[in-house]
Image (tube, rainbow, N blue to C red):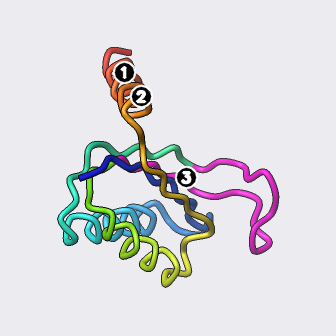
């Protein structure tokens, strides 16, 4: 199993409850495919660098997980099928990125 992180941007017209439901849906896609979720960070409503679908803000969410490579295809298909998702990116983390992410998580817990 490889370690990945995915960041996706949800449309700003969602209520907090709808946003949380969408995040849970994508986490469910991962766990149903056998992935182990390491952490989840909700970065909140942020301004986009450029307008997407005439929207200038979006809800950013980061999820770190361990999964088999086939799981990524399933996850990204779910992103493409959901109209709430404006953009997404999934990146495989090498050992240095994984170590850095762990340090960052530990520093957040202490603060």
Comparing 83 with 16, the one in front is 83
Task: Name the residue: 21% across, 64% down.
Answer: 31
**Nearer the viewer's eye, disc 3 or disc 1?**
1
Specify whether 48 is left or right of 18.
right
Task: Name the residue: 26% across, 61% down.
Answer: 68
Q: Is residue 63 magenta?
A: yes
Which is more N-terminal, label 1 or label 3?
Answer: 3
Residue that mark 3 sits on: 60
Which label is found at residue 103? 1
Part of the protein shown in magenta: 45-64
Where's residue 45, x and y in %? Answer: 60, 50
Q: Circle 2 — which element?
A: helix
Where's residue 73, x and y in %? Answer: 40, 73
Q: What's the CA distance linking mark 2 and mark 3?
A: 24 Å
Q: What's the CA distance linking mark 1 and mark 2?
A: 11 Å
Tally of numbered discs: 3
**Nearer the viewer's eye, disc 1 or disc 2?**
2
**Residue 87 falls in image quadrant:** bottom right
Residue that mark 2 sits on: 96
């Amino acid at each position: 199993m490889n370690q990945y992180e995915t960041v996706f941007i949800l449309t700003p017209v969602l209520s907090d409850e709808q946003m949380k439901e969408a995040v849970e849906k994508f986490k469910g896609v991962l766990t149903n495919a056998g992935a182990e979720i390491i952490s989840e960070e909700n970065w909140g409503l942020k301004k986009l660098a450029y307008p997407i679908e005439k929207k200038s803000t979006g809800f950013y969410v980061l999820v770190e997980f361990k999964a088999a490579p086939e799981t990524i295809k399933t996850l990204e298909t779910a992103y493409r099928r959901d109209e709430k998702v404006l953009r997404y990116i999934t990146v495989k983390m090498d050992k240095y990125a994984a170590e850095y992410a762990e340090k960052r998580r530990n520093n957040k817990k202490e603060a």
